[in-house]
Amino acid sequence: MRWENPKAHSKKSKKSKIKNNKLNQPARACSKPRANSEASGKKISPRKSRTPGADVSGKKLKGSGAKKPPAVAKKRPSRAKTWAAVPTKAEQLALARRLMAGNVPEVSLVESQRRAHVLAVIGEFERQLRVYRDAPYVGVKAAHRQPGTKEFAKWERVTALVEQSGVGAAQYVKAHFFWFDRWFNRAPRSYELGQREGKCPSLERVRLYQHEVSQGAVQATRDVSGPVSRTSTVPAEVKHANSERQLAQLMGAYDLDAESVLRMFSDNGDASAYFDRGWLRAHPVWQKIKQEGAR
């Protein structure tokens, strides 16, 4: 006789009963049909499509986890340049060809005079800089003389201040060299000639310089010279005393006499690095060592 598990039989019978009940149930009635808009007199709005994270009305739900569209970064407007761009090599070559062909660009008289004034101020600054540094080959870069560059624009502002001060370019530049040498022990930089603000702007420096000239403290015709590098001269007595002290220290350190120490330095050729040459030539022991070496 075959044995069967009663629990497994009961589980199978329960499953079969549930399945049969589902099949025997009548079909559910469909949802209530929507009323005709013409019969009810109401306007039915079209159903909004559902999107992830939104309800039936299309509104976004809080905490739904839906990602926001990435924000588009607004591009900042570029600042307009206050000076014209430096012409490229192709533009320079095209300009040279037009000049060779006779197509010379027209420049107004006012523009040419303004450029001449700017170049005169640059030339005066360059001249006084060479005098101050005692270097005939120093000067400003070529871009400072090229119209349209930011360096040339700085010199245009300096030229405007020169005209506003009422003095010539030479006195204007000399005033800055005078005060910068006295205050800072250096020559002024190009942009410092066009300072309109600060504790002592450019026009105030010129006014103070004119006051010094009127008082007779400064000669207006004399250029400003830079600091001269002075070499300190040590007296011969001090050098000889240092050489004697050096010899005594070496004698005590090596426990040798003066002749052995000087002979050691004579053989190595380093005597002038430790002793003064004039003291060596006058020392009798050194003279004896040299005479023996000459024989």
Image (cartoon, rainbow, N blue to C red):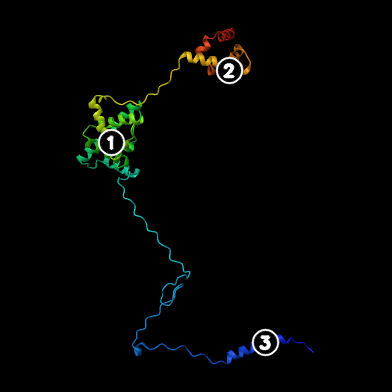
Write down the residue under mark 1.
Answer: 202
- Looking at the rendered structure, the secondary structure element under dot 1 is helix
Between discs 3 and 1, the one toward the N terminus: 3
The answer to whether residue 25 is above or below residue 224 is below
Q: In which quarter of the image is the N terminus?
A: bottom right
Judge the density around disc 2: few (<14), some (14-19), many (≥20) Cα neighbours within 10 Å.
Answer: few
- Residue identified by numbered label 3: 12
Of pointers 3 and 2, the one earlier in the residue sequence = 3
- Residue 251: numbered disc: none
Mark 1: give few (<14), some (14-19) or many (20+) Cα within 10 Å. Answer: many
Task: Tell me how far mark 3 sits from mark 2, CA to CA.
Answer: 117 Å
Decide if residue 170 is in sight here. Answer: no
- Which sits earlier in the primary sequence, circle 2 or circle 1? 1
Is 122 positioned to the left or the right of 67 in the image?
left
Tell me the quarter of the image containing the C terminus. Answer: top right
Mark 3 or mark 2, which is nearer to you? 2
List x then y, in percent, for residue 262: 58, 13
Q: Is residue 153 above or below residue 10?
A: above
Q: What residue type is labelled 2?
A: Gln
Numbered label attached to residue 249? 2
Amino acid type, callout 1: Ser
